Amino acid sequence: MTGAKNQESLELHARDVTFDWSATPLEWITGEPFASMGIAGVLHLVLPEGERWFCEAFTEALPSIKDEELARTVRGFIGQEAMHAASHDTAVTEYLERQGVDTGPFVRQMEFAFRHMLGPRTYRSNKARYNDMVERLWLIAAIEHYTAILGVFVLNSRWDEFEIDPAMADICRWHGAEEVEHRSVAHDVAMYFDPSYLHRCRAMLTVVFFMLTFFPRAARFVERASTGRRMHLPRFLWEYMRAGRKGLVPPIRSVVWFTLLYFDPRFDPETIGSTDQAVAYLASSPAVRGSGTLSAQRRVPSESWGCGGC
């Protein structure tokens, strides 16, 4: 999943996509209910509220960014993340709820987490308000490290060896490709405001706790809501490892490795994934092609590089 640093610069913009969920079953990877429900739970229940939180934090930070190129990239990032949230919101109402999943309880948990626990607070001084914003920017940078890893995974997954629903596969790969495309933005913004290694590490430890808490809960929630069966944590871990061996979800050893990579003081998001691969998928995505929106235009040509061990 790693490779030589990519010097390519892209003009980011949102792609106006739509997805037809009318024929998508809950078990969208045939014969693999755990992977199907786990991926759907994380994508459609956890990420939308988080991505709206990203947009709010970056909109708050934007007036303080004096580097015009970075500010332009941030505006493109905000547009892409807003489209991600809207697309997954549609999946919640038109896909999960149509399958009989009452998403309300979990969605309300995500709203409380991102709007109240992690949302902006009222402070008496501008300095305290600024420091709070910087902390949120570093949290976003840490989360974006994982979304980039997930993006590289879905672009290189073994899903096509199974019978899969094309709409679900496309929303995963479209979203993942854009995460790879803008994988450096959140890190660059956090570094612009506060290049603190200690703040980076503290943010990642917080995000690891969040992931270990909410991602399994999302998968277990969808299964219980759709089947009435409670998935205990040992079974979740067993099913996850089994799905990882099949190439349906990111293997645990890969997630651990790339988490540790983030703690390298020399870490650079550009060394994860391939922009060329991401842009190539976006040029062929059925949803993107159907929207009539062109893929991101290159502003500075550079050599392409591979995906390494992904």
Image (cartoon, helix red, strand yellow):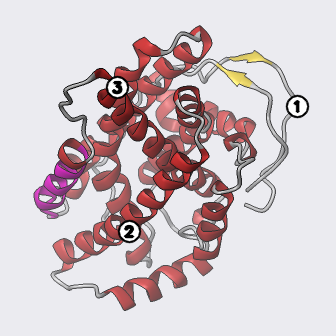
Disc number lying in front (2 or 3): 3
Secondary structure, mark 1, is loop
Q: Is residue 301 positioned above or below 240 on the image?
A: above
Q: What is the span of residues highlighted in magenta in the rendered image?
A: 101-114
Q: Of the numbered discs in the image, which one, if any, rests on residue 38?
A: 2
Q: Is residue 117 positioned above or below 18 on the image?
A: below
Q: Picture coordinates of residue 153 (x, y %)?
A: 61, 58
Q: Residue at x 63, y 66 (%)?
A: 158
- Looking at the rendered structure, the kind of residue marked 1 is Glu
Q: Of the numbered discs in the image, which one, if any, rests on residue 197?
A: none
Pick the residue in front: 239 or 110: 110
Which of pointers 2 and 3 lies earlier in the amino acid sequence? 2
The answer to whether any part of residue 276 appears in the image is yes
Identify the residue under disc 3.
127
Secondary structure, mark 3, is helix
Identify the residue under disc 1.
303
